[in-house]
Image: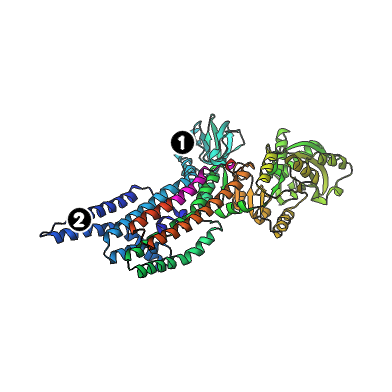
Amino acid sequence: MIGRFAKLGAYEELLQNRDFIKVGCGALLALAGFLLGRHVPDAVGSSALLWLSQGLILASVAINGLPVILGAIKGLLARRVNVDELLALAIIACLLNGELLTAAVVSCIMVLGALIEEATAESARKSIQALIQVSPKQAVIVTDGRERLVAVEEVRVGDILLIKPGEQTPVDGLVIEGGSALDESAITGEAMPVEKQVGDAVYAGTLNHNGVLRVRAEKVGADTTLGQVIRLVSEAEAHKPKTIAFIDRFAQYFTPLILGCALAAWLLSGEFGRAVAVLIVGCPCALILAVPTATVAAIGRAARAGVLVKGGQHLESVALADAILFDKTGTLTEGNPRVDAIIPAAGVTRDELLRQAACVECDATHPLARAVIQAAHYAKITVNAARDLFTEIGIGVRGSVDGRLVEVGSVYLYGGVAAVPGALQPQLNAVKERGATPLMVYRDSQPLGFLSVSDRVRSGAEQIVTRLKQLGLREIGILSGDHARSVDLVGAQVGVTRLWSGLKPEGKLQVIQELQTKRARVIFVGDGINDAPALAAADVGIAMGAKGTAVALETADIALMGDDIGKLPFLIALGRRMLLIIKLNIAFGLLFNLVAVVAGASGLMTPIMGAVVHNVGSVLVVLSSASLVFFKEKSLS
């Protein structure tokens, strides 16, 4: 029933044998009591057989009906009134009226129906169960050249693990030896294996295909990306769409309304059975299941596609959004920039310029910083991490290198292009003209030169923007801290004309807020680190680079675990389908209850028939919601 099984966030193994054994035992006792009562002979000892018959039926009620009654009483004592009280009253009313068999049969049918509803609804949670199943239980630790098999709970950060072909990665870590292709579909939804080499990150739950890897553990247990995904998807069930507010308001008045209808049916007809039938069919299980089952199914479907949604309300907001804004670097571009030119100032060598920049950037996480480190690695330059590092988001980073202050960042570090030496300006303008990003390097406030960093637009980005337009999003734009020429070139390649460039984090925030004042519902897609204010301010914040990035998982409402913006049209279409299913479920639930109550009050439906019909309606709603598990975006095209 509702009180036992409808709280989907706290589900347990409902298909345990004891649940069905209890219902079956109760049903058999009721059947035995019924058969015995029909064949009581008119002879000595018949009263004892009659008592035995009634005792068996009462035992059936105790097994299946008593837990419902006790649950309703506990709810009343805790001042939590829900529709379970209606069923409890129906069972008690049958007992007081001497209709013991009716009470037993109704109890059996309703509890069995609740189990069937929950068994059907389990298909909506398959994604969470699948994630749990891919979590390996054991790991091989290598210590002093010796291999040791241990439970995964014993692995600690810094341990060296051996992962052979066909085995699953037990932790998040870095490859320190070997190479292989890993199946990351459990985390990202991407079917194609991903090649991994020394220095690459691997994630718990991914399957090693064809090579032997030695991996240093970086995150273990619940801290791994897989652990966070399982936790957040499970918690997402508790975050309801705003649509459920209607159900909550309705439920406050529903129980008194049904009680009034049952009383009226009894007083007007004089038939007690009609009142009992109204109480049974009046339980709005179909209506109350309408929202949570659809929400869980949609969140599970998204998780299977590598999209982590932190609550049903965020899917609802995605469905209702009419504007989507993108960060540029690492979002519309691939996020794998490279240094394509090193332009030193007079008296500075290329290697010295690159070394100074790499020492400051070596602990930074921005894609541009990774490009600088990679360039230093290829140039075989020794890099020592700077001290006293400080990052000014949207501007740059500074630190102490060899006892001197070194700063790396945009041209706005010292007031813009005007502060750049005249000898460097023609080359700086040339770099900007071709759409690359210049990284200025200063030492003790004196310019050492700049690095030109370029990135490529993601494959298929133009088609994705076209599909978003087809879905009816009236405002599609790019918010970037990069210079105007770079943003213009990317916008032209992907088909976006609403462009904002040279924005600091607070500038992106301001643009979003301005759109919201015009009643636009805004989706913002960013990298989850530098874009935290914008992600938080948007109606829906969607983080790229979420794979293994705790900041993205905590800041954004939704995370694209495979960094694939191609999932955005699917996500919007899924949210819209979820809202459609919810509305259809609510309409069906209301109509179903109305017709059932009228039929019960008019005598067209007995209490036992009402119990059967009630559960049929609930199962239909759950099946409707479960259809979201098989949703494909093209079905709405």
**Vertical placement of residue 81 versus 369, above or below:** below
SS class of the residue under badge 1? strand
Q: Which residue: 68% across, 37% down? A: 460
* Outermost residue to the right: 422
Q: Is residue 93 left or right of residue 618?
A: left
Q: Is residue 500 left or right of residue 319?
A: right
Name the residue nearer the viewer: 504 or 144: 504
Judging by the rendered image, the residue that carries numbered circle 2 is 38
Judging by the rendered image, the residue that carries numbered circle 1 is 148
**Vertical placement of residue 498 versus 48, above or below:** above
**Position of residue 140 measured from the top left corner of the image (x, y, whole percent):** 48, 36
Quarter of the image with the C terminus in it: top right
Mark 2 burial class by Cα count in 10 Å: few <14, some 14-19, many 20+: few
Name the residue nearer the viewer: 325 or 580: 580
Which comes sooner in the sequence, label 1 or label 2?
Answer: 2
Residue stretch in magenta: 620-633
Q: Main secondary structure of the magenta part?
A: helix
